[in-house]
Image (cartoon, grey):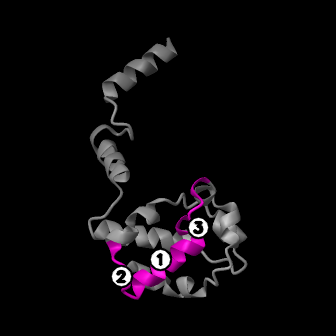
């Protein structure tokens, strides 16, 4: 499991909470589970078998991976790498983010993240160049 490779980072988190001050998601929700501290607690419980993957999926996708938590962390822990490893495992288990899956599908079909018809896009380009 990809997340197991990051166990040492999860274990190194001292739960000081400094990460909360810079987290844009935590600032919006005021949910500790949306801070890096909360995510490390959740992932530790997951690795220990106290939680199931489907119980943590939503929280793992509620992170921008902006690295503000890493910049604030006194230990310099790479929390975004842990979150990305958790997301990779979620995808393997069929618990991927629906929005991300739609973006990938759109890119494959239309070469556009919004799924717009390439012909319509070219028409707008022609109008802009006129």
Query: Which residue is depicted at the point 30% across and 64% down?
Result: 95
Callout 2 crowding tier (Cα within 10 Å): few <14, some 14–19, many ≥20? few
Task: Compare residues 41 and 72 and report the one nearer the observer.
Answer: 41
> Quarter-wise, where is residue 47 in the image?
bottom left
Say which mark, if any, is on residue 42.
Answer: 1
Magenta residue span: 28-53
| Quadrant of the frame with the N terminus | bottom left
Q: Earlier in the sequence, mark 2 or mark 3?
A: 2
Query: Is residue 29 magenta-colored?
Result: yes
**Which residue in the protein does label 2 denote?**
1
State the predominant SS element of the stretch in magenta: helix
Query: Which residue is depicted at the point 37% across and 79% down?
Result: 51
Find the distance from the CA under tag 2 to the CA under tag 3: 23 Å
Q: Give the structural element (helix, strand or loop) at label 2.
A: loop
Asked if 78 appears above or below 7 in the picture, the reply is: above
Q: Earlier in the sequence, mark 2 or mark 1?
A: 2
Query: Is residue 70 magenta-colored?
Result: no
Asked if 8 appears above or below 60 in the picture, the reply is: below
Asked if 90 appears above or below 25 in the picture, the reply is: below
Find the distance from the CA under tag 3 to the CA under tag 1: 11 Å
């Amino acid at each position: 499991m990809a997340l197991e490779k990051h166990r040492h980072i999860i274990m190194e988190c001292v739960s000081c909470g400094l990460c909360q001050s810079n987290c844009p998601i935590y600032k919006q929700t005021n949910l500790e589970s949306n801070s890096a501290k909360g995510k490390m607690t959740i992932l530790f419980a997951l690795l220990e078998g106290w939680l199931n993957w489907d119980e943590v999926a939503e929280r793992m996708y509620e992170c921008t991976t902006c690295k503000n938590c890493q910049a604030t962390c006194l230990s310099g822990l790479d929390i975004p790498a842990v979150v990305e490893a958790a997301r990779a495992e979620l995808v393997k288990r069929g618990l991927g983010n629906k929005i991300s899956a739609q973006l990938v599908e759109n890119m494959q079909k239309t070469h556009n993240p919004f799924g717009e018809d390439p012909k319509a896009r070219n028409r707008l380009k022609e109008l802009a160049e006129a």
